[in-house]
Image (cartoon, rainbow, N blue to C red):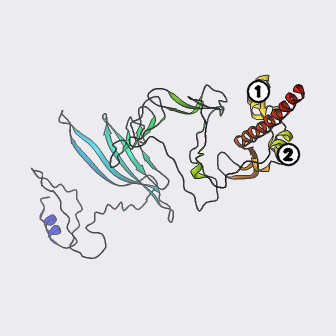
Amino acid sequence: MTRASDTAKLLGAGATILDGTTISTADNTEQLTLTSTDADANAGPEILLDRNSSSPADSDRVGKFTFKGRNDANQTVEYGNIQSRITDASDGTEDGRIIIQNIIAGDVAGVMESDGTETIFNNNSKDLDFRVESDGNANMLVVDAGQNNVGIGTSPVSTRILHVQSNTAAYFNTMIDHASSSNNVYGLDIFFSGQSPDNNTSEFLRCRDTGAIRLHIDSDGDILNHDNSYGAISDEKLKEQIADASSQWDDIKALKVRKFKMKDDVSTKGDSDDLWKLGVVAQEVETAGMNNLIKNKKDLDPDTNEELGTTTKTVKYSILYMKAVKALQEAMTRIETLEAKVTTLENA
């Protein structure tokens, strides 16, 4: 900037420079300082990039900060930039996009982009990981772009699309609080989106330690654990009004044990003797007078989670098994009474 007219413009208030301007120094001091002495709550100082076009259009770039330097071959390289573009120039529905780009392996690629519909990281599909640190964990959330998997609390290993690890507690906890919502919410929904592997060759869940696999939930719904142990919290200190159960003889006698096939099994696998199952039918359990063993679960659309207006009945088999144990005890008492009478008659 050498012309006298340019110098005069800079010295006057509200100067406007129409030509390209370069500010150059030979050291690392600030080349440009903007100072505002205003004391109100408004922003200041400000930098304004105004694309004052007479014919604005979608995809126009409205401003760009470019960061350049040299490589070891003394070539000028754009190492990164921050820019903004118009995505919708229509009056009343204007949308914009902010783009941050970085040079990766010699190519400038999108690191982050944000517009009116989404914020995207790594939009150019580079081997560029996304990592979030917490106060005590450098890998609180990791998206490994090269392995195409996610780690929570750890950097994921290649064999797991989701790898969750806690270094401070031996549990994985997921919770969704929906106190003000009437819609059903899944705490954790594990979904085979492209197949229905109703077998034990795929798994919904596997729990293991350094010594062995402790629990499987197979893709057919079967649950298997290492020690064949299932239980419930049953300490006396947690219970009150403890008393002997009433007779379960009539309930168990009225129960109809059925063999059947599940419709979805037949539709996906074809009719086969391997599909026979043993159990009860919920409506027949109700008819036998055991309504307290039945739970009605609202049917939901699996994609939208909306209620369909119908219900599906389920049976509390764990309670049914305890009723059977009580009925067996009653049968044993009757058998022992008969055995005592037989013994008395034989010794008469």
The N terminus - image quarter: bottom left
What residue lies at 46% left-to-right and 31% top-to-bottom?
Answer: 209
What element does badge 2 sit on? Answer: loop
How many marks the image carries: the answer is 2
Q: Amino acid at mark 1?
A: Leu
- Residue 126 sits in quarter: top left
Residue in the foreground of this view, choosing between 168 and 199:
168
What residue lies at 56% left-to-right and 29% top-to-bottom?
Answer: 227
What element does badge 1 sit on? Answer: helix
Residue at the disc numbered 1: 275
Q: Amino acid at mark 2?
A: Ala
> N-terminal of the two: label 2 or label 1?
1
Residue at the disc numbered 2: 288
Residue 172 as seen in the image, left or right of residue 29? right
On the image, the x and y values in percent for residue 24 come to 13, 53
Query: Farthest residue in the left direction?
Result: 26
Crowd tier of the residue under label 1, counting other residues whose Cα lies within 10 Å: few below 14, some 14–19, many 20 or above: some
On the image, the x and y values in percent for residue 333 come to 79, 37
Query: Farthest residue in the bottom direction?
Result: 40
**Mark 2 and mark 1: Cα distance apart in space:** 26 Å
On the image, the x and y values in percent for residue 124 come to 42, 39
Residue in the foreground of this view, choosing between 52 and 325:
325
